[in-house]
Amino acid sequence: MLLKSRETIGIRVFLLYLGMCISSLVHAQLFSEYNFKFKNYNVKDGLPHDKVNKVAQDKRGFIWLATEGGLSRFDGFSFKNFKHNFQYKNSLPSDNLVDIAIDSKDRLWLAFEHGFCSYDIATGAFEKYTFEDKNIECQK
């Protein structure tokens, strides 16, 4: 009889603890000051490619996405895409971008398979840098 009441008390304590945990999780979800909503975007929404390799945000709040199909700028509503254009020498040098960074002057730096480039937001021009047959050392 004594053993059965200890088991009952143990089960009740466990259920009470479990109920408190679930209650706190539900409360955190319902009454949180943060209300995160996620939306997935793809080519149908305007992205140049479904595979996004890197993402960066500039000082003005634009989201820049380095994809396997070019560069994309997202303003929260729509995408503006930049792709390589053989007829324009200041276009994006390659569509297959692997990395992106933004410096203190708000310039974009994009890495692709055989080099990197910078993008001047004011002029809309890309400047290409290559390292084929050259030994370029990165400085920290």
Image (cartoon, rainbow, N blue to C red):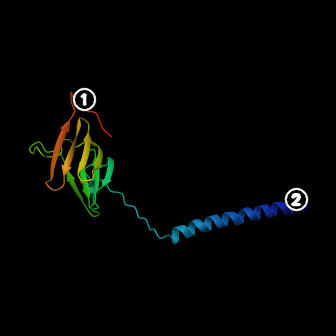
Who is closer to the viewer here, 133 or 51?
133
Counting from the top left corner in percent of width and height, residue 115 is at 23, 37
Q: Give the number of the mark in front: 2 or 1.
A: 1
Q: Is residue 77 left or right of residue 120?
A: right
Q: What's under tag 2, amino acid-wise?
A: Leu
Please, which residue is most extreme toward the front here? 140
Who is closer to the viewer here, 114 or 22?
114
Of labels 2 and 1, earlier in sequence is 2
Judged from the image, the secondary structure of the residue bearing numbered disc 1 is loop
Judged from the image, the secondary structure of the residue bearing numbered disc 2 is helix
Label number found at residue 135: 1
- Residue depicted at x 10% and y 43%: 89
128 up-or-down from 123: above or below: above
Q: Quadrant of the N terminus?
A: bottom right
95 up-or-down from 33: above or below: above
Q: CA distance from mark 2 to mark 1?
A: 78 Å
Which residue does the numbered mark 2 point to in the structure image? 3
Counting from the top left corner in percent of width and height, residue 65 is at 29, 51
- Tell me if I can see residue 69 in this picture: no
Who is closer to the viewer here, 139 or 130?
139
Please, which residue is most extreme toward the top here? 133
Who is closer to the viewer here, 91 or 120?
120
- Tell me if I can see residue 111 in this picture: yes
Q: What's under tag 1, amino acid-wise?
A: Asn
- Residue depicted at x 66% and y 66%: 19
Mark 1 neighbour class, 10 Å CA radius: few under 14, some 14 to 19, many 20 or more: few
Counting from the top left corner in percent of width and height, residue 83 is at 19, 47
Label number found at residue 31: none
The image quarter in which residue 9 lies: bottom right
